[in-house]
């Protein structure tokens, strides 16, 4: 029987009992048991998370697990793995446990001080880059409001023809994480980090070619509906925005024209059911043209784009 076939058949077997101290456990057996254990704790991606946790504990990538899947784990390796597994069973996000999150071309340091970057927000970055491609690829000067890990600002700095990025956040702790990520990726020193809420971090009369933001947009009353990983672990300040989830989006839309260059782009991520209201608010300022709503990866209206009237 080939190794691949043995692996496939083993993966279909039901889980076994919990590991005993004196018992030999192979890498594959530990993955299978841990996957079932996590699933029983309500973790949706139990198998995948078990692989990530074990690869982190062993200091190898996930592929290496399957190149040595029948290797017995030492007692020392199991002791490193156990607390990681317990943390995930307690519904702590995987990204906080392994200390990193992937975002476009970046691998970002991520911990409980910051919101975990989402694949949806990668689309927001792409929308800005697509807009820039119609301007000979020039993004210009960018304001990344609510930078968190620095995901959006650093992506635009490394992928777009930016002349500079001002990345702001109300959380000093979040900015500490963003600065660490910038040390790895912002080789040209294009990104400047500032602490402050909304416009208070900007200089009087300061203007940008692009204002981009993934702000807090969840209504306070929706907290109980969130996944435990989000509700119990991610920073409230990065998630919630008042009774209707619009406490950041509304003043941002109202004040953006003062800080956006003529013909510049405002690119916003918003919650489900909010895009139409944001588009209406933009129209009512009489400062924007080409207002459009764009879908997320699942086809739902998630992003609102608008250009400052010339």
Image (cartoon, grey):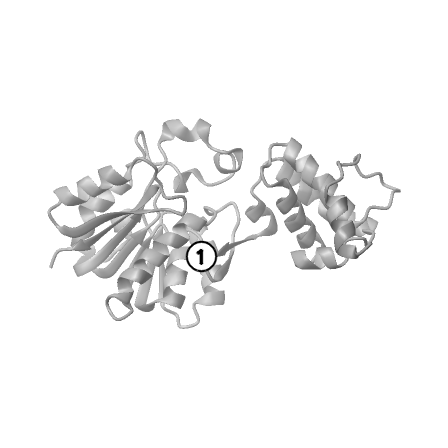
Q: Which corner quadrant holds the N terminus?
A: bottom right
Classify residue 239 as left or right of residue 142. Answer: right
- In terms of image quadrants, where is residue 31? top right
- In x, y percent, where is residue 76? 80, 51
**Residue 140 visible in the shown view:** no
Residue located 21% across and 45% down the image = 253
Q: In this rendering, is residue 193 above or below 200? A: below
What residue is shown with label 1? 178
**Residue 11 visible in the shown view:** yes
Q: Which corner quadrant holds the C terminus?
A: bottom left
- In terms of image quadrants, where is residue 205? bottom left
The residue furthest front is 1
Residue located 66% across and 31% down the image = 40
Q: In this rendering, is residue 206 above or below 17? A: below
Query: Is 65 or 230 nearer to us in this picture?
Result: 65
Helix, strand or loop at label 1? It is helix
Query: Is 248 or 104 nearer to us in this picture?
Result: 104
Classify residue 159 as left or right of residue 180. Answer: left
The residue furthest bottom is 188
Residue located 27% across and 42% down the image = 249
């Amino acid at each position: 029987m080939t190794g691949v076939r043995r692996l496939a058949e083993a993966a279909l077997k039901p889980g076994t009992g919990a590991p005993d101290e004196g018992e030999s456990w192979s890498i594959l057996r530990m993955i299978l048991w841990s996957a079932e254990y996590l699933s029983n704790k309500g973790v949706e991606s139990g198998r995948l998370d078990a692989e990530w946790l074990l690869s982190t504990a062993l200091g190898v990538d996930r592929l290496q697990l399957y190149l040595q899947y029948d290797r017995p784990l030492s007692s020392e390796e199991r002791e490193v793995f156990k607390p990681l597994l317990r943390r995930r069973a307690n519904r702590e996000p995987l990204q906080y446990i392994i200390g990193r999150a992937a975002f476009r071309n970046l691998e970002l340091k991520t911990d409980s001080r910051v919101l975990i970057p989402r694949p949806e927000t990668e689309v927001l970055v792409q929308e800005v880059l697509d807009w820039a491609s119609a301007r000979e690829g020039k993004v210009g000067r960018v304001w990344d409001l609510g930078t968190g890990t620095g995901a959006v600002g650093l992506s635009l700095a490394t992928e777009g023809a930016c002349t500079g990025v001002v990345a702001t956040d109300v959380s000093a702790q979040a900015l500490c994480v963003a600065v660490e990520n910038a040390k790895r990726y912002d080789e040209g020193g294009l990104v400047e980090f500032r602490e402050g809420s909304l416009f208070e971090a900007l200089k009087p009369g300061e203007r940008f070619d692009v204002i981009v933001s993934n702000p807090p947009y969840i209504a306070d009353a929706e907290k109980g509906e969130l996944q435990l990983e989000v509700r119990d672990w991610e920073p409230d300040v990065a998630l919630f925005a008042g009774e209707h989830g619009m406490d950041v989006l509304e003043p941002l839309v109202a004040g953006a024209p003062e800080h956006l260059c003529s013909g510049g782009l405002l690119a916003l991520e918003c919650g489900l059911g909010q895009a139409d209201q944001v588009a209406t608010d933009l129209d009512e300022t009489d400062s924007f043209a080409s207002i459009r709503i764009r879908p997320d990866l699942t086809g739902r209206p998630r992003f609102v784009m608008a250009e400052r009237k010339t």
